[in-house]
Amino acid sequence: MTCGACHDYNFITNGYHFQQGRTDGSGKIVASDTYDPKYPWSLSSGLFGKHSLVSTDSSQLTRKVNRNFSEMDKSSFFFVQNCGACHPGGGWAEFDRKGNLYYDDEIKKFGYELSGDDPILDGDYTSFSAGNEKNGAPWDRSGVSEADCLICHLKGYQWKERGTALRGRFFKYGPSVGAGWATVKPAQDEAGHLKADLVNIDYTKKEVADFENLHLQIVRRPSDENCWSCHALYGEKKGGYDWSLETDIHKAKGMDCVSCHPGDKEHNFGKGNSLQQTVRDDLDHTMNSCEDCHYKRKDRRAPRYRHPFSPKHMRRIACQTCHLPYRSVPAEFVYDQTSGDTQIYETSKFLSPDPLNPKPSHVGLRPEIWYPALREFKGKIIPVKPAIAIYWGDLDEKTNVVRPIPLWKVRELKKPPFKDDDGDGIPEVNSLDEIKSFLIALRSKDRFGNPIANIPVLIKGGLLYRLDKKGGVEKIQHDQAQSIDFSLNHNVRSGSLAIGARGCKDCHIRNSPVFLRKELVDPYDEKGRPIYIEAWERLGIDKEKLSRLLLEQ
């Protein structure tokens, strides 16, 4: 009714920031119950529908069509309420998976009434979410979360207050709250987050968006502060990002987010090619790469790189590997879901400022510093932040695929005893006896009378644990038990701080901090001890080649 008078609302809201996997580039709805035949619990390529094990509560979207509550986890309403703070509205926050408004305030009808569906087992309208049959989905009272233009284009936008309104189920008031045109009465939810108990729209409030001077406060080019309001939370948690003058040479040179991530008319921002982000892969490489600016001269202002070593290094090693030598912000590292409540451990628990020694005995080093792991990706060695997920699943022996068990079922399980073996004050499921007891317990039925798992398994530390025919526990290597690696591309250090700036011996030395750096495999083995391997092992380098790389021949 405001921005939409001049700007094509439907065109803009098909951008991937709004849709997050719900639609493709043409606007066709692609999120569906049959989206991924191999992993059928992932319903799209984006944050709305793509299952994430490395999240606070194993974010699993409920399918559109279900047979019973046992098949269900979190509804669309749940996602808008709890994840909408970092979503600009529109897309899945406004329309259901058949293209109808969740609730049309003009005709006073729910979307399921227009399509003739039963709301009880409909993932968009069910009152059941995260094991709670009374969670509700009162779209008629909350309203829908329309696209919020000012979340990017207003100076001083109050995005935290907007999140409070959404958590309080005041979806339609979110943009007004964020702009500063409302009074919010806050309270705390069960998780300790602030939510709104009451919202009063008050257009006389002008602390942020003054009507008379609004045109002076609206920015065409989104500021770093507006981008970072949402992306900081994700970037810090997943990759240890710190967008500051001290930690990124591009920031220090006056560049901002949209310098590298320019937007188009549809509000799709330039993308690279990240390991875990799969939404709209057709737009990958729409931003300039390091080589584009510093070698191919697409940006004439970028300095031309001058490296004294063999060009072979450039063909084999990604620029980020040397120019992101370490991280200076702790990041989430281990997600242990075995108790039903996700226990998250940061990098500082298992990594240290000494890449060769995860638990250095000497003092004086900054404990928050850690070194990335190294991986092979499309023929190049790249730096990554691994995330280790430990969870219960149900094995399909025909496909060898493990379906994660929704955490609400684990929370309701009559749990066997398990103790703290690593001495950190938090018990963990790690001994064979503990694992066996849990696997037996997971053979039981949930409160709706359906099996929790037909073949229960534990995914942990590169291995799948299951009961064998004799009633013992067998361990098998399994692809789904490998770490979930996140690309690292930000916090670029200048040449003098990069690996190799001091010559060949930055890497090629007997105690190489690159090839011999420690990478966590399992946070606690059967005796509670962490298990590490060295980078050369994960990169598939044999010992003969390693000795050459370490200049030991």
Image: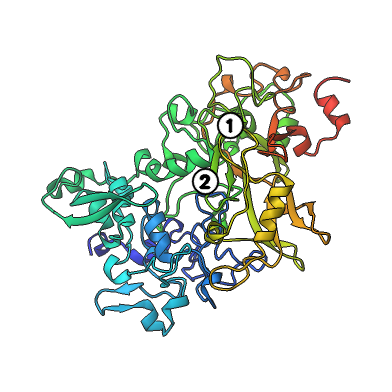
Tell me if I can see residue 547 in this picture. yes
* Residue occupying the point 21% across, 56% down: 198
Residue 478: numbered disc: none
- Residue 13 is left or right of residue 315, and the answer is left
**205 or 348, nearer to the observer:** 348
CA distance for labels 1 and 2: 35 Å
Q: In the visual, does 65 lie left or right of 307?
A: left
Task: Residue 287: give its label.
Answer: 2
Rendered location of residue 180, percent (x, y): 21, 48
- Residue type marked 2: Met
Nearer to the camera, 94 or 188: 188
Q: Secondary structure at mark 1?
A: helix
Image quadrant for the C terminus? Answer: top right
**Image height check: is 229 above or below 108?**
above
Q: Which residue is mark 1?
A: 349
**Percent position of residue 404, x then y:** 62, 59
Q: Amino acid at mark 1?
A: Lys
Of residues 486 and 403, the one drawn nearer to the viewer in this rendering: 403
Nearest-to-viewer mark from 1 and 2: 1
What quarter of the picture does the N terminus occupy? bottom left
* Residue 480 in sight: no
- Crowdedness of circle 1 by 10 Å Cα count: few (<14), some, many (20+)? some
